[in-house]
Image (spheres, rainbow, N blue to C red):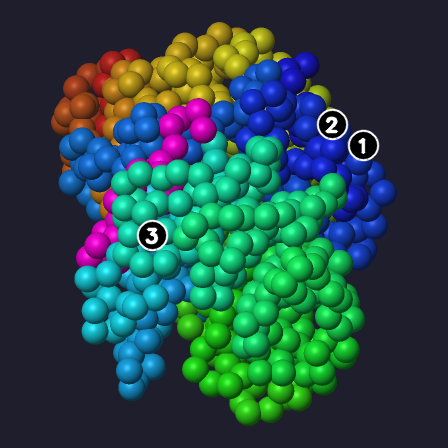
């Protein structure tokens, strides 16, 4: 059994939260040259067995581990060696060998004139009865350039872990992205100089610390700098070569030229505006990872994965350890209005720093129910007799930490609940103008919170500010291919699922949404699933059915991310991958689920057309021609397969993609049902492949592949691959669907929401691609019959494809023919007429 596939077996473990400096913390693994992915997962399997998943804190820790494993499983090689997380950016020339940004034109399409269009969500979905609804997506930090008189004219910058930097010039009413060329790399912190004002900020430098310190999956490419008010950014002298794999922390910007940033080994400093960087502090070990910082004058305190350091003058160095700890556990840090430093540990205990003797004293009692998720989200404010502690929720105290109130509640349900609703998981917090007014960046976006003038207020006013910041991290998309009606369903990390019907997006309660499907005969029938295979159905498009209509199933052995496909000719049937291929069927009373006994083992991907099912998994490939009743075992093995598709008209034609960063080992094709494969990688860049998809029913072969950085296509059998279209931000494309009705390809991105592009001009010269001449089809539209006339003598066949590429009718032709289509549903179809060496395709409409 291939080692890489064994991940799917190992991912069905449970986990515990204890982390020791001498033991393995999985988030460090990718940064260590000697680390091995499979050994890491195996060790966590042993460490994590005793977790009670009925406890919310444990369930969140469980999800974070599986997200980490899901991120890396397609990237590591077959031996489990970690690559650089940002390897793809180097491989396609966005970054040079030293990690510096190159010309943005390096990633544009070579010839396609088509442009991608964002189709949403471009604003908050309707709550749909959800008391703590999803929002636009996670943000890490805020930089505010205050307008002297009108907050509605503030200049704001927010930064996402996947989604780049966004700028608003009207206080958050509208936003524009500013770092789309490396949007998937993410940003930990963004700061400008202390003397920057609304009047002069365009002349002052803005510095960006790249990566994602809280999440750690996304590695840094160094510190970037803008000299035009945040419109464009360029690399500084602190950038990382391909082999580095660094995680940077927050910034201290002293003036135009003096900047510090937390680093894995300590703290870096520049005194010449970023041209050169040196060590301000060396911790003496490699995973210190100093990330969070607070300053008071030139005094500064950085907290790391284990330790806390302090200096009286950060411009001169002089750092000292003030907390050393063998247990892994980040600290929140802040400076109070009294000028004193405060830290909060992983247990919720706040301590106050005495800089006369570099010691800490306990401050108040532990925050009740404190859950920073191993430091993933951890913020602290001490201001004007109010202490505000952010973790999963945010609690405040007005008596120096003796009593705590859950005033910012990510799980608020109604007015009887504690506090008021703000999305959970707080990554950044800061002070605004009012005495008790603050901002929070969290897994939902940016919110302002105002306690008024009353620190005893347990129901603060909360205002959401990032309504148009499109940073949704989507795992999958489903479309209504029967009509051009703008109907979608997407499943998202941290922000549930969104269902669009009749022009409006609605919230669907899923936690982490993972999978989605829409019935192509009745688009009001929809399915969505969360992590580990819990699937629900709605027959209203989820409008008024927040958690579905009561029909649900769980897929046995499903990993955090699991594959799911709807049958292309019978939408009442779905196939889902767990420890086997499972058949899910709607019998009008309930959803039923049964194993198909494929023998494929833990499933990595599923493709289905007609009665054909192709599955890849721990035991290789399996194919069924009868809806899963019987299975065959193709003998071919091109490598560690992570996605598959096949030709609906010829099931012997199979396509597969391979994970990892082995150059020229990307896409493979079989013409004998998977017994042998030919490498058709051609000039495909060395990126991580995500999903392969054949455009069904065409006269020529048009193949699309979603990758970690965009979508590629070939129209010459894989000799040449081209980037599809222009304008798609450089983020991970997790799922693609073809909308046959309007010839568009739809892409779900991880960090920039949902996009679409016209593929008629990118692949077909016009609406009818005719290699076979002299073919007439009439009447079109038709309600019952169509006539097909072929001038050239010979033996021909025809295929009729539905809107999802499923073959619904086929037969033989010769000369003049009349085809009965009365049994077909009223919608658009694709007719393909073909002979031995030629073919013809045309859209037909059944009234």
- Determine contact: label 3, label 1, CB under 8 Å: no
Whether the magenta-drawn stretch holds residue 235 is answered as yes
* Residue farthest toward the front in the current orientation of the protein: 356
**Residue at (58% x, 27% y) in the render:** 32
Q: How far apart are the two marked residues, 2 and 1, measured between alpha carbons? A: 7 Å
The answer to which quarter of the image holds residue 398 is bottom right
Query: In the image, which residues are magenta?
Result: 219-244
Instruction: Examine the rendered structure and indicate whether residue 339 appears above or below residue 270.
Output: below
Q: How far apart are the two marked residues, 3 and 1, measured between alpha carbons? A: 46 Å
**Residue at (79% x, 39% y) in the render:** 48
Instruction: Examine the rendered structure and indicate whether residue 699 appears above or below residue 762.
Output: above
Q: How far apart are the two marked residues, 3 and 2, measured between alpha carbons? A: 45 Å
Q: Which element carries disc 3, helix, strand or loop?
A: loop
**Residue at (16% x, 40% y) in the render:** 113
Does residue 687 appear anywhere in the picture?
no
The answer to which quarter of the image holds residue 201 is bottom left
Whether the magenta-drawn stretch holds residue 85 is answered as no
Instruction: Examine the rendered structure and indicate whether residue 39 appears above or below residue 317.
Output: above
In the displayed structure, does residue 46 sit left or right of residue 728?
right
Q: List the residue tagged with mark 1.
A: 46
Looking at the rendering, in which quadrant would you find the N terminus? top right
Q: Which element carries disc 1, helix, strand or loop?
A: helix
Residue 118 placed where, x, y %?
32, 55
In the displayed structure, does residue 730 sit left or right of residue 389?
left
Residue 471 placed where, x, y %?
42, 56
Mark 1 is surrounded, within 10 Å at the Cα level, by few (under 14), some (14 to 19) or many (20 or more) other residues, namely few
Looking at the rendering, in which quadrant would you find the C terminus? bottom left
- Determine contact: label 2, label 1, CB under 8 Å: yes
Q: List the residue tagged with mark 3.
A: 258
* Residue 42: mark in rendering: 2
Does residue 96 appear anywhere in the picture?
yes
């Amino acid at each position: 059994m291939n080692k890489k596939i064994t991940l799917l077996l190992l991912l069905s473990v449970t986990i515990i939260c204890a982390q020791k400096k001498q033991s393995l913390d999985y988030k460090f693994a990718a940064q260590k040259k000697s680390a091995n992915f499979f050994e890491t997962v195996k060790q966590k399997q042993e460490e994590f067995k005793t977790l009670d998943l009925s406890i919310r804190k444990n369930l969140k820790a469980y999800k974070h581990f599986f997200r980490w494993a899901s991120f890396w499983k397609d990237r590591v090689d077959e031996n489990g060696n970690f690559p650089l997380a940002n390897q793809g950016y180097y491989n396609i020339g966005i970054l040079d060998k030293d990690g510096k940004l190159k010309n943005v034109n390096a990633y544009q399409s070579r010839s396609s004139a088509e442009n991608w269009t964002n189709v949403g969500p471009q604003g908050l979905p309707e709550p749909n009865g959800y008391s703590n609804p999803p929002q636009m997506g996670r943000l890490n930090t805020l930089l505010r350039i205050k307008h002297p008189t009108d907050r509605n004219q503030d200049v704001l910058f927010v930064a996402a872990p996947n989604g780049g930097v966004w700028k608003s010039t009207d206080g958050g009413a509208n936003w524009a992205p500013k770092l789309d060329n490396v949007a998937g790399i993410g940003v930990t912190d963004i700061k400008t100089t202390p003397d920057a004002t609304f009047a002069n900020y365009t002349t002052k430098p803005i510095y960006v610390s790249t990566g994602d310190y809280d999440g750690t999956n996304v590695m840094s490419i160094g510190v970037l700098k803008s000299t035009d008010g945040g419109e464009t950014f360029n690399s500084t002298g602190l950038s990382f070569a391909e082999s580095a794999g660094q995680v940077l922390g927050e910034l201290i910007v002293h003036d135009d030229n003096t900047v510090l940033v937390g680093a894995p080994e300590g703290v870096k400093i520049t005194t010449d505006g970023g041209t050169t960087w040196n060590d301000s502090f060396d911790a003496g070990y490699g995973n210190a990872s100093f990330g969070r910082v607070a300053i008071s004058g030139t005094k500064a305190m950085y907290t790391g994965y284990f330790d806390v350091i302090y200096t009286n003058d950060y411009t001169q160095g002089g750092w000292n350890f003030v907390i050393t700890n063998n247990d892994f556990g980040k600290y929140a840090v802040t400076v109070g209005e009294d000028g004193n430093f405060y830290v909060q540990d992983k247990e919720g205990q706040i301590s106050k720093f005495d800089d006369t003797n570099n010691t800490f004293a306990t401050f108040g009692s532990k925050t009740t129910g404190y859950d920073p998720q191993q430091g993933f989200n951890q913020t602290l404010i001490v201001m004007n007799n109010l202490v505000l502690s952010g973790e999963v929720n945010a609690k405040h105290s007005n008596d120096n930490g003796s009593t705590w109130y859950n005033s910012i509640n990510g799980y608020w349900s109604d007015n009887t609940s504690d506090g008021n609703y703000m999305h959970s998981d707080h990554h950044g917090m800061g002070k605004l103008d009012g005495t008790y007014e603050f901002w929070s960046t969290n897994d939902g976006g940016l919110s302002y919170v105002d306690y008024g003038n009353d620190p005893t207020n347990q129901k603060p006013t909360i205002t959401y500010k990032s309504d148009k910041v499109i940073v949704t991290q989507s795992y999958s998309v489903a479309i209504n291919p029967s009509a051009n009606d703008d109907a979608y369903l997407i499943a998202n990390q941290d922000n549930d699922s969104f269902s669009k019907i009749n022009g409006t997006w609605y919230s669907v309660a899923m936690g982490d949404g993972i999978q989605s499907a829409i019935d192509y005969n009745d688009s009001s029938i929809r399915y969505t699933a969360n992590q580990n295979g819990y699937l629900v159905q709605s027959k209203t498009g989820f409008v008024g059915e927040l958690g579905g209509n009561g029909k649900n199933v769980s897929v046995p052995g499903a990993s955090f991310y699991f594959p799911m496909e709807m049958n292309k000719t019978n939408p009442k049937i779905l196939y889902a991958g767990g420890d086997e291929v499972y058949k899910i069927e709607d019998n009008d009373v309930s959803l039923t689920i049964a194993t198909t006994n494929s023998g494929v083992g833990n499933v990595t991907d599923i493709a289905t057309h007609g009665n054909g099912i192709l599955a890849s998994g721990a035991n290789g490939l399996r194919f069924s021609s009868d809806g899963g009743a019987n299975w065959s075992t193709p003998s071919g093995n091109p490598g560690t397969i992570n996605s598959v598709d096949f030709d609906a008209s010829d099931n012997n034609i199979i396509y597969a993609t391979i994970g990892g960063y082995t150059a020229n080992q990307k896409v493979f094709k079989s013409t004998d049902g998977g017994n042998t494969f030919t490498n058709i990688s051609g000039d495909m860049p060395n990126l991580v492949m995500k999903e392969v998809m054949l455009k069904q029913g065409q006269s020529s072969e048009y193949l699309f592949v979603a990758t970690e950085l965009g979508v590629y296509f070939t129209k010459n059998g894989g000799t040449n691959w081209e980037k599809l279209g222009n304008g798609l931000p450089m983020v991970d494309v997790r799922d693609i669907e073809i909308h046959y009705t309007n010839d568009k390809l739809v892409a779900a991105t991880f960090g920039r929401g949902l996009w679409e592009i016209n593929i008629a001009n990118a692949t077909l010269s016009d609406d009818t691609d005719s290699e076979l001449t002299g073919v007439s089809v009439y009447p079109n539209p038709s309600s019952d019959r169509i006539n097909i006339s072929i001038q050239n003598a010979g033996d021909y066949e025809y295929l009729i494809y539905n809107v999802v590429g499923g073959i619904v009718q086929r037969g033989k032709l010769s000369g003049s023919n009349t085809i009965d289509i009365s049994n077909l549903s009223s919608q658009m179809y694709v007719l393909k007429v073909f002979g031995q060496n030629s073919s013809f395709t045309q859209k037909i409409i059944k009234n």
